[in-house]
Structures are given as structure tokens and as C-alpha cells.
Amino acid sequence: MNTLAGGGLGWLGIVRLGLVQTALGAIVVLTTSTMNRVMVVELALPAMLPGALVAMHYAVQLLRPRLGYGSDVGGQRTPWIIGGMALLALGGISASMATALMATHLGMGVALAVVSFLMIGVGVGAAGTSLLTLLAKQVAPERRGAAATIVWMMMIVGFIITAATVGHFLDPFTPMRLVAITSCVAAIAFLLTLVAVRGIESRPGAVAAGSATPAPGNVQTPQAFRAALADVWADTRARRFTVFVFISMLAFSAQDLILEPFAGMVFGYTVGESTKLAGVQNGGVLLGMMLVAVATTLGKRGRRFGSLAAWTIGGCISSAVALALLVVAGHVGGEWPLKPTVFFLGASNGAFAVAAIGSMMALAGEGPPSREGIRMGLWGASQAIAFGAGGFVGAMLCDLIRAASGSVVTGYTTVFAIEAVLFIVAAVLAARIGMTASAASTAVPAQQAQGFEGGLAHALKPGLNGR
């Protein structure tokens, strides 16, 4: 069923929206992985070029709050999802054309690539923010953990299918073959998006029970964006959650570029063995996501193992423990069971990530009406900045510490230790956000919670800066 009898999306509706994430992932993996490799290997260009282009794709997602606010003003999310996917598809195609052009006209190719990756970043921001906002409004609270898992697993499916299919058709490689295949993938992804969102937002009042609904006539104007952003930032929970997202995602992504080199330099893994280690980690991520989906769907909402807040906090703490074990592994070396440790890290990261996304969906609908998009955009921007900076900062710190200490092990383990501390800080922030939510839910009846949140935001306005 697309919808539930009491309002909100059913499982089929959630899967349909997950197809949008599959389509998004299919285009993104081509631009950040395949084209990256072509620039560096086939065209023998400096690795910093694709690195800078990907960084631009993350940086432009600072526009997410503004994009989310645009969907708030219109009251409809599907036009922004379709428009974002159209821009992403065009950006992907033009990025492939830019890559091909670099082979003969480097300057023109780089200039086109800059424009293309900016389009990709804006497209991802518009489609991704509006998709999560639509899920936040139309998925019942007890299904949000499972919905986040389904959507993110379907994005991973998009990565896998695209990588396998494109990898088959790209050989023997030619620049024009890359353009043709990318164009086909982009067209299929856009058509899939159109089918997935068709009619899913057409029913008036199709929101999940417990989600805030705008009052009749509550129409915002574009000029009110700064005031709307200031109102969201004045909400203590929203502000704390923004900081939580940044710190936790920074810790989450800081090991991306150093885990496989760590296995090679400290444990003597070959290239093939370290690549398999990444597979072990991803297997753990999927298991962690599925655990959250099952626990939050079958468990009683808000109680123990069924609580998204509990899984968010527990995932952060578990990730910190796994990273601490990697610190010990670096100093012990040799016989340490590295693969089980990395699997444990993956499972912890997966549980934390999907629970945090589910919590994000829940918090997006708890503020004033017609602010869901801007709240989701604010958190999406924080996540994008953290992801863009995490890998670079982790690798840079590792190099600096190695150079200063003269020890390879010290370089890697120090970064792992810093990540563990960041996860503990994130867990504390998540706990404080959860405590605020609990207090709010017990202080007033459910139908008055929205008004209470507004008063609470002003009463606690100093927030993090005032403590």
C-alpha cells in the first residue's frame, strides 16, 4: 500500500521514494568515482583536480537551507525533487562531457567541469533535502527508522548496480563511451524519479500522525528566508542537533581515506586484502542499518530498543569503542583480529547513521509549521560540510602527526583516538537533545507540543553558546 489508513506513507510508498535515492546515487557514483579515476589514470591529471571538484560539490550544498525553504514556501516537495534530479542529471552529463574535453582542451574541460559539479551539488541539495522532508512529513513516527534504512540501502543499491553495469560497458574505454553511458544512466535515473514521485504528494493532508501541519493561509514569502533561518537557529534543539550532525559526521568520515592505508602499512595487507577489508566494513554498515530498522519498527516507540534516540546515542558510543579498539590494534599489530574490529566499526557506524537520519526526520516536523524544509536543509548543509572536510582533515592530521612523531602507528592511531573523542562528544549532545524531547513530551499534552516547543526555544535561547 502507498498510504496507511490513518494517514502517512505505507511500505510501498516508502520504497517508491527510496527509488529516488537509488537514482540519485546512480548519478553521483559516476561523478565522484568513475570520472575521478578517468581524470587521474587515463588522463594523467593531478589527483587534486577531481578532489577539488568533489569538494566544490559539497561546498555548494551550503545552499540546502535556502533550497529547503523554497519547498516550504510552495508547500510541495515533489517539484523540488524533480527539479533537483533534472539539474543533477544535466550536471552528470555535462561532467562526462567535461572529462572527455579535458583530453584535448584541458582549460575548457576544467571550466566546464567546475560548472558541472556546481550543478551536481545544487541538484543533490534540492532533491535530497526535499526527499527527506517529504519522508519526515508523511512517514509515521514508528516507521522512521525503517524508512531511513530502506532509503539509504536503496542508495547503496544504486551505487552497486551502476558501478557493476557501467564497469561492464565502459571497456574498452573511450571518452565518448563515457559520455554516452553517463547520458543513459542520467536519463534512466530521471525517468525513475518521475515514476517514483508521481501522485505521492497529491492527496491533501497526506501527512503522518504526529507531524505538524501548516495553518490555513500560512504562506511565507521568499524575502522572509533570513527571518525563517533565524527562527530555526533560535530553537535550542535545532541548533544542538546541527552541531551534533557536524561533529558526528566529521568523526564518521574522518577515517574514509586512512583505514585502508592503515591496514596496509601497519598490518601488511595487500591492495586486494585492504579492498576486501572495505567490503567487510560495508557489510557491517548494512547490518547496523537493518538492526535499527527492525528494532525501531517492532519495538515500542520511545522505549528502550525501539527508540531512535537510544540507537543514535548507542551508535555513537559503540563507534567510539570500535575506534578505541583500532588504536589498541595499531599498537598491538600482528595477531590482532583486524577484520572483526572493522566489521564492528561498520555496524556501529551504520546503526548510528540511520538512527540519526531517522531522528532528523522526527525533529524536522516538531518545529513550527512550514519550517520542515529549512530545518532539514540546515542539517543537510552541516552534514555535507562535515563529509567534505572529514576525509581531508583525517588524512592531513595523519600525515602531520606521522611527520612530527616519526611513527606511522602514532599517526594513524592518534586520528582514530580523536575520532573516538568526537563520537563521545556527539553522544553527549544527542543525550541532551533527547532529554529535552522527553521533558517536552511529559510537560504538555501532545496537541500542545508544537506551541510548547516555540516557547521552550525562546526560553533556552542561549543554547550551546550560553553554557
Image (cartoon, helix red, strand yellow):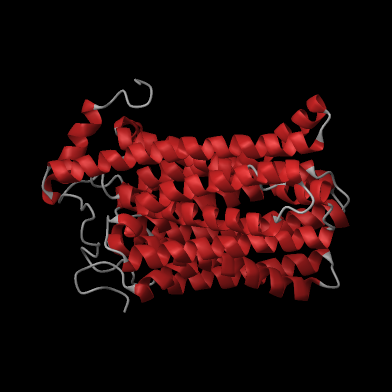
Residue most extreme to the bottom: 1
Compare residues 39 and 273 and report the one nearer the observer.
273
Which residue does the image show at 68% across and 66% down from the upper left?
A: 182
Which residue does the image show at 62% across and 36% down from the upper left?
A: 417
Q: Is residue 185 left or right of residue 265?
A: left
Q: Across the whole image, how many numbered discs are drawn on residues? A: 0
Q: Is residue 285 left or right of residue 290?
A: right
Give residue 140's quadrant in the image: bottom left
In the rendering, at what x and y percent does residue 463 appear?
33, 27
In the rendering, at what x and y percent does residue 459 appear?
21, 26
- The quarter of the image holding the C terminus is top left
In the rendering, at what x and y percent does residue 390 appear?
62, 40
Q: Is residue 403 above or below residue 417?
A: above
Which residue does the image show at 70% across and 56% down from the upper left?
A: 337
Would residue 220 be seen by someone viewing this image from the given angle?
Answer: no
Compare residues 75 and 105 and report the one nearer the observer.
75
In the rendering, at what x and y percent does residue 68 appear?
39, 47
Compare residues 55 and 389 and report the one nearer the observer.
389
- The quarter of the image holding the N terminus is bottom left
Give residue 332's quadrant in the image: top right
Q: Is residue 195 above or below residue 40?
A: below
Would residue 443 be seen by someone viewing this image from the given angle?
Answer: yes
Q: Is residue 241 above or below residue 129?
A: above
Residue most extreme to the top: 466
Which residue does the image show at 55% across and 58% down from the upper left?
A: 347
